[in-house]
Image (tube, helix red, strand yellow):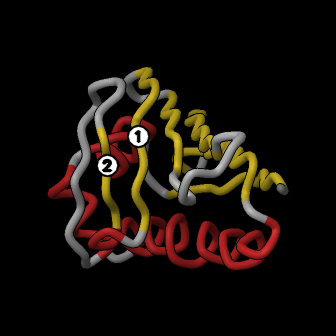
């Protein structure tokens, strides 16, 4: 198991980034794929039309999202923590993803940078 931690900057206020990460219609706008999401703890979520699935653990509005990402019946659980900080250029995002299966670590790291936060940054730049 490996962990991944990285900071990203998104050119939008934390309130806008939080909405883009938690509202299904907004998620669909920047990903281009179907999304199921709720801010209710213990609710299931699905992103990229089921490519990423898991369970929502905790939300702090406009500040923090904690999720469990499913990789089969893996133990220990893979936990994603996204913390939003105000930044002079919009929002600084602190990402921590723990317990990534070794064989998926590189793919996940690239996915976070290019497909997830890269796509989100592009969404706000294009507005």
Name the side, left or right, on which 83 lies relative to 76: left
- The percent coordinates of residue 73 (x first, y second) are 56, 51
- The residue at 40%/35% (across/down) is 56
92 or 44, nearer to the observer: 44
* Quarter of the rendering occupied by the C terminus: bottom left
- The percent coordinates of residue 92 (x first, y second) are 63, 45
Residue 102: numbered disc: none
The picture quadrant where one finds residue 101 is: bottom right
Would you place residue 29 above or below residue 18 in this image?
below
1 or 96, nearer to the observer: 1
- The percent coordinates of residue 110 (x first, y second) are 68, 77
Could you give the CA–CA distance between mark 1 and mark 2, rounded to whole angstroms? 6 Å
Name the side, left or right, on which 40 lies relative to 8: left
- The residue at 45%/24% (across/down) is 58
- What crowding class fits label 1: few (fewer than 14 Cα within 10 Å), some (14-19), or many (20 or more)? many
- The residue at 64%/46% (across/down) is 78
Name the side, left or right, on which 120 lies relative to 22: right
Nearest to N terminus: mark 1 or mark 2: 2
Residues at badges 1 and 2 in contact (C-beta under 8 Å)?
Answer: yes
Q: Farthest left residue?
A: 25
- The residue at 37%/49% (across/down) is 21
Q: Which residue in the structure is indicated by mark 1?
A: 55
* Quarter of the rendering occupied by the N terminus: bottom right
61 or 16, nearer to the observer: 61
Name the side, left or right, on which 38 lies relative to 67: left
Mark 2 residue element:
strand
Would you place residue 25 above or below residue 113 in this image?
above
- The percent coordinates of residue 61 (x first, y second) are 38, 24
Q: Farthest front residue?
A: 73
Q: Which residue in the structure is indicated by mark 2?
A: 45
Mark 1 residue element:
strand
């Amino acid at each position: 198991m490996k962990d991944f931690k990285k900071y990203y900057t998104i050119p939008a206020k934390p309130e806008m980034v939080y909405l883009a990460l938690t509202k299904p219609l907004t998620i669909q706008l920047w990903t281009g794929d179907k999304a199921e999401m709720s801010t209710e703890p213990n609710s299931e979520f699905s992103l990229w039309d089921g490519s990423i699935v898991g369970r929502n653990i905790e939300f702090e509005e406009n500040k923090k999202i904690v999720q469990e990402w499913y990789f089969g019946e893996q133990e220990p659980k893979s936990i994603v923590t996204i913390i939003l900080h105000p930044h002079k250029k919009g929002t600084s995002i602190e990402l921590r993803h723990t317990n990534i299966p070794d064989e998926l670590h590189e793919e996940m790291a690239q996915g976070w940078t290019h497909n997830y936060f890269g796509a989100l940054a592009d969404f706000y730049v294009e507005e």
